[in-house]
Image (spheres, helix red, strand yellow):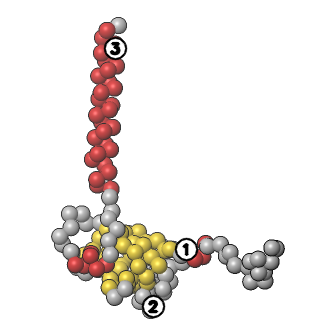
């Protein structure tokens, strides 16, 4: 009976150590920092990691699809900062000039090689709370 108890305690300790190791080692490798274009270009080559997440707007007239439409190059901007982006994959339906996008990937020789492209359009999903035909105090 004592040996079974000892085996059970050892098993619990081993499982706990493995779980702790997965949590501490695994989470550090998965972090993708959200940075600005300015910071990315300013500190290029000095980062410890090579993957980044950025957000910005697609510059008007900058979208260029490949013939199979599985690759797209475009310019993304934030204020006065611009970055050339190359993305491989299907683009979201809302991807177009002026769209707000979030990209993930790495930078190579001044070009951001994105492997994840998401569009963002909060205004499309906002509820219209205006009532043009009624006064706000009509029932009072």
For mark 3, does the 10 Å Cα neighbourhood hold few (<14), some (14 to 19), or many (20 or more) residues? few
> Among all residues in the image, which is located at the extreme right?
139
The residues bearing labels 1 and 2 have C-alpha atoms spaced at a distance of 20 Å
Mark nearer the viewer, 3 or 1: 1
Q: Where is 112 relative to 26, above or below? A: below
Report the residue marked by disc 3.
5
Residue 13: give x, y in percent of width and height: 30, 27
Mark 2 highlights which residue?
A: 60
- Identify the residue under disc 1: 122
Q: Position of residue 10 (x, y in %)?
A: 29, 22
Q: Residues within 10 Å of mark 2 (few under 14, many from 20)?
A: few
What whole-number distance in Å separates the C-alpha atoms at marks 3 and 2? 69 Å
Residue at the farthest front position = 140
What is the x, y in percent for residue 134? 78, 81
C-alpha span from label 3 to label 1: 57 Å
Query: Would you say 136 lies left or right of 108 here?
Result: right
Q: Mark 1: few, some, or many residues within 10 Å (few <14, many ≥20)?
A: few
Task: Residue lying at the far left in this picture: please name it.
Answer: 46
């Amino acid at each position: 009976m004592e040996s079974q108890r000892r085996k059970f305690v050892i098993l619990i300790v081993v499982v706990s150590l493995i779980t702790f190791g997965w949590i501490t080692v695994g989470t550090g490798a998965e972090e993708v920092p959200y940075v600005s274009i300015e910071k990315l270009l300013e500190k290029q080559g000095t980062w410890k990691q090579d993957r980044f997440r950025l957000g910005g707007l697609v510059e008007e007239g900058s979208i260029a699809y490949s013939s199979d439409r599985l690759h797209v190059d475009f310019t993304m901007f934030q204020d006065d900062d611009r970055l050339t982006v190359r993305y491989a994959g299907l683009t979201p339906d809302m991807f177009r000039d002026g769209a707000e996008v979030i990209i993930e990937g790495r930078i190579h020789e001044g070009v951001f090689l994105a492997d994840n492209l998401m569009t963002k359009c909060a205004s499309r999903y906002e509820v219209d709370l205006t009532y043009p035909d009624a006064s706000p105090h009509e029932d009072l």
